[in-house]
Amino acid sequence: MSHRQVRVNDRKNLPYTDAVVHETQRMANVVPMSLPHKTSQDVAFQGYFIKKGTTVFPLLASVLYDESEWESPHTFNPAHFLDEESKFIKRDAFLPFSAGRRVCLGESLAKMELFLFFTSLLQHFRFTPPPGVREDELDLTPALGLTLSPSRHELCAVVRH
């Protein structure tokens, strides 16, 4: 595959790569809070009563790090998206694009573009920290704001031959 550009159809044959892309989105969720929703009926949730028509802001990050949903929620683990036979599996708790009926319309396009972009980069480059910096020294804590932006890092992109 390294002699041709990656294609959309390659995704089904690269389950580990697809799992890495999904796990990256789970761990590095850019928008931790969804757009406002209104409840369509009265709801009892975790001991609280929420009246029909109440505006709620779903905290998607709470599901992406839920210990009852993920084997190791605070560790980068692509196996979260692989079955026993190393085939890619969808997870209901994977909600980086919002939830409910107002889920992001561009989700499937975004997932495909992320896959193509990521595999193309890895096909042509090997990424390493700059000389003198070990991988375990990198601080992956995001910059807080309305969105969670990655912290500034320097890295080396070495061309693969």
Image (cartoon, grey):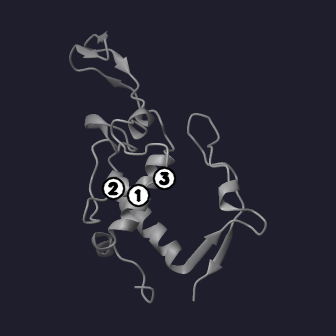
Q: Is residue 115 above or below residue 34?
A: below
Q: What residue do we see at 40% from left, 78% from top?
A: 6
Q: Secondary structure at mark 2?
A: helix
Residue identified by numbered label 2:
81
Q: Compute the Cα span from label 3 to label 2.
A: 11 Å
Query: Residue 132 or 125: which is nearer the viewer?
Result: 132
| Relative side of 12 to 117, left or right | left
Q: Residues within 10 Å of mark 3 (few under 14, many from 20)?
A: some
Q: Is residue 137 above or below residue 122?
A: above
For badge 2, the amino acid type reads Phe
In the rendered image, residue 56, in percent from the top left (x then y), is placed at 37, 21
In which quadrant of the rendered image does the N terminus lie?
A: bottom left
Q: Residues within 10 Å of mark 1 (few under 14, many from 20)?
A: some
Query: Residue 113 or 90: which is nearer the viewer?
Result: 90
In the rendered image, residue 13, in percent from the top left (x then y), is placed at 29, 74
Q: Is residue 106 above or below residue 10?
A: above
Q: Secondary structure at mark 1?
A: helix
Q: Compute the Cα span from label 2 to label 1.
A: 6 Å
For badge 3, the amino acid type reads Phe
Marks 3 & 2, CB-CB < 8 Å contact: no
In which quadrant of the rendered image does the C terminus lie?
A: bottom right
Q: Secondary structure at mark 3?
A: loop
| Relative side of 20 to 128, left or right | left
Indicate which disc residue 78 carries.
1
Which image quarter: residue 158? bottom right
In the rendered image, residue 35, in percent from the top left (x then y), is placed at 41, 31
For badge 1, the amino acid type reads Pro
| Relative side of 84 to 14, left or right | left
Q: Is residue 145 above or below residue 91?
A: above
